[in-house]
Amino acid sequence: MTKKIKLLLAEDEPSLGLIVKETLETRNFEVCYANDGNEALEFYKTEKPDILVLDVMMPKKDGFTLAQEIREDDKSIPIIFLTAKSQTKDVLEGFSSGGNDYLKKPFSMEELIVRINALLDRVSLKTNHEQIHIGSYIFNYTKQSLNLNESSVLLTHREAELLFHLYQKKNEVLDRTYILNKLWGNDDFFNARSMDVFISKLRKKLQEDVNVQIVNIRGFGYKLIC
């Protein structure tokens, strides 16, 4: 029998929370359901889930704060945010607080399940790519860090995912639409702006090696040259 994936769901709207919980349980997930941020944190500590699905607006502790606290303990557990917020600054705040994905309400259960499975697949990939050489840098995908000589720079989850995909297509063009759909869920204007911000951050963190560049191929995407 296939081992069930343990998922922590934090959602303060009971009707939605129960629908999500019951649907996921029919898809071979073991679901721990919390109604607020504090309860979710306790479940995280005791149940050791494989993936987190967190509502942003919750009583006692919001989803962004909860994710930041969990990231202090675990840098790699996948986190998906559920929220009615849709402005670019809210999306960026979600990613900077440690989120891997961001699903806007209302959403379909099939879309949520697809995104959960995609994140779990990427976690599995990480175990086979712990150390990657990018020019003079050593990129540790598991620890989400860039090491150069004796110095180390931490990456956010989104930066690490984006750099990994760039590396997989190194010296070739990484299609802009493909990576937006793969990591952000769709290629709308707000997500495109968000990706541009993350590309800029990666460039700054790779600037110590002049032989490493992330080049914008206008109209097509980006190329990691190394």
Image (cartoon, helix red, strand yellow):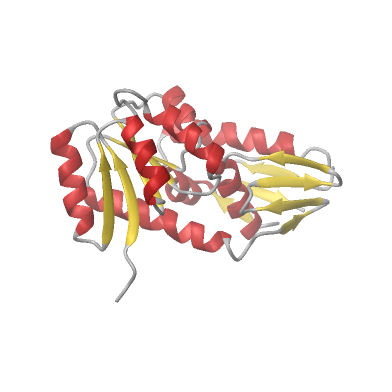
Q: What residue is rendered at 33% in x and 51% in y?
A: 7
Horizontal and vertical percent for residue 117?
37, 58
Q: What residue is rendered at 44% in x and 25% in y?
A: 88
Using the image as rendered, state which of residue 38 and residue 190 is in the foreground: 38
The relative height of residue 189 versus residue 115 in the rendered view (above or below) is above
Q: In the image, 12: left or right of 71?
A: left
Q: What residue is rendered at 56% in x and 49% in y?
A: 161
Using the image as rendered, state which of residue 131 and residue 170 is in the foreground: 131
In this rendering, the count of numbered labels is: 0
Q: In the image, 9: left or right of 144?
A: left
The relative height of residue 226 versus residue 17 in the rendered view (above or below) is below
- Residue 23 visible in this rendered orientation of the protein: yes
Using the image as rendered, state which of residue 120 and residue 51 is in the foreground: 51
Horizontal and vertical percent for residue 175?
54, 51
Q: Residue furthest bottom?
A: 1
Q: In the image, 144: left or right of 207?
A: left
Q: Residue furthest front?
A: 46
The relative height of residue 219 versus residue 26 in the rendered view (above or below) is above
The quarter of the image holding the N terminus is bottom left
Q: What residue is rendered at 62% in x and 59% in y?
A: 168
- Residue 186 visible in this rendered orientation of the protein: no
Horizontal and vertical percent for residue 207?
79, 37
Horizontal and vertical percent for residue 29?
28, 59
